[in-house]
Image (cartoon, rainbow, N blue to C red):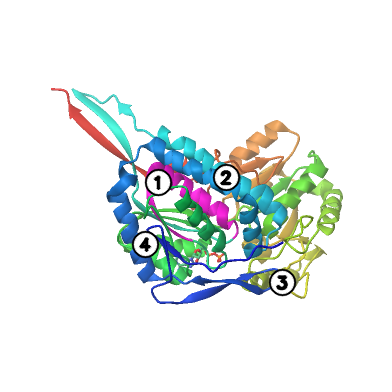
Amino acid sequence: MTQKVKNGRILINNEWNEAQSGKTFPVLNPSTEEKLADVAEGDQADVDRAVVAARRAFETGPWKKMSARDRGRIIYRLAQLVDKHKDELAELETLNNGKPIFETKNADLPLSIDCFEYYAGLADKIHGDTIPVTGEFFNYTLREPAGVVGQIIPWNFPLLMAAWKLGPALATGCTVVLKPAEQTPLTALRLGELLVEAGLPPGVVNIVPGFGPTAGAAIARHMDVDKVAFTGSTEVGKMVMKMAAESNIKRVSLELGGKAPNIVFADADLDAAAAGAMMGIFFNQGEVCCAGSRLYVEEKVKDEFLAKFKARAESLPLGDPMDPKTRMGAQVSEEQFKKILGYIETGKREGAKVLTGGGAAANKGYFVKPTIFSDVKDEMTIAREEIFGPVVGAMTFTNTDDLIRRANNTMYGLSAGIWTRDIGKAHRLAKEVKAGTVWVNCYNCFDAASPFGGFKQSGFGRELGKYALELYTQVKSVWVSLN
Ligand code: ADP
């Protein structure tokens, strides 16, 4: 039985408010195109209030004085509350995003809980160094929180992206203004309730749902936000960086788009590679920045591999995201749905061959058939641009040096997959590929302890693990004369 979905409001100082403007916006279920809830539409005025609350919480009050271990305890309580409400949150995520309940239950929720648990444990292990400088001095560093941080997150993993952002920010003692994506604000707002229940002091986390050019830009431009962490498109990432530069040079970290090569050598376990190629492109309806959307198959196994891949794609259960048997749900919005269908048409027009799929999958809801193109050339639009949907372009290669050049010939550099039984080749290639994450004989593996982020125009800064502490702390060097 599906839960009743509440309307959403803005969280500032642990209180829930309407937008100052009184405006709301509708949030839809992309699998039925029906409205789920109305949500307060925050804009600059609400962001301003949220930043004031976050600044006060950062500079004064219990958060500032709290020991790191107690901060960790609050994050741990949050992890437990998310765990307690995991079925409800998984259902809410599926309703709002269109992804299968199988995935929200088995990926989004466990990964979010792990992330909070990881940073709960890390909170009291953040420290500076002592440095053996020349002369009669004692020199040490303090690792201090970055301050008030703005966090702008996307719609593809709404709760998980909130966890990736909030975990390290809270562990380091920052305070936060979080803006969920306008398509999918519901789980972040529910998380806000759990944060209050977990005992987070007022103003430490403020959540302002709203649109990018208004609420998002107000965060990126704000003179009293010390750092902005953004996950989304490369296009908007550039705007965020520019707004940060033109306002107060706030620090920036960006996790942007991708066009990952997924490379299958003839000596690979081809069944495992076909399963990996599926995971690489059809997981989360292809709405994954690290999706393996450029499939490079060694020429001599092309037919055998593509036959296996096609058979798997055609047996993927697509349909009602709330059905536990469904493995592929709806795209998040009409805009994405149309954009993906547009790319499919471009692929056909530019001469790629539809091996399977190639269009919409239902009359209602934003469903797209899992689509494999073969005979794709590197210069085709579908091989260069991020589609952010269940569309993969298969290409072939014969020579490894040439393959590396082609795999790296992209403005992106978020991730890559390599399928081979030759471990020397796997490690050599892992070094050669210009990407922040390389998966060997696996794909889309994540762990709260392992860093994630991009090379090139996929962004900079590493989320997760101890690496994320760099994003949310700043180093102070203290010199003490010993004379
Ligand atoms: P997509 O194009 O895949 O929807 P976006 O990069 O537009 O991804 O969205 C990611 C996040 O960035 C969302 O929270 C969105 O509201 C926000 N956003 C979009 N435009 C802007 C902007 N001009 N300034 C700040 N944030 C923005």
Q: Is residue 231 above or below residue 78?
A: below
- Structural distance between the alpha carbons of marks 1 and 3: 39 Å
Q: What is the residue that sits farthest to the left in this orientation?
A: 483
Query: Where does residue 356 sit, x and y in percent of width and height?
Result: 82, 63
Query: Where does residue 435 sit, x and y in percent of width and height?
Result: 57, 46
Q: Viewed as shown, does residue 68 lie left or right of 310?
A: left
* Mark found first going from the N terminus, 4 or 1: 4
Circle 1 — which element? helix
Circle 3 — which element? loop
The front one of 476 and 186 is 186
- Structural distance between the alpha carbons of marks 2 and 3: 30 Å
- Find out whether the residues at labels 4 and 3 contact each other: C-beta distance under 8 Å: no
Part of the protein shown in magenta: 156-179
Query: Where does residue 314 sit, x and y in percent of width and height?
Result: 84, 59
- Structural distance between the alpha carbons of marks 4 and 3: 35 Å
Residue bearing the label numbered 1: 472
Q: Which mark is residue 365?
A: 3
Residue bearing the label numbered 2: 113
Q: Residue at x 73, y 59 (%)?
A: 393
Q: Which mark is residue 430?
A: none
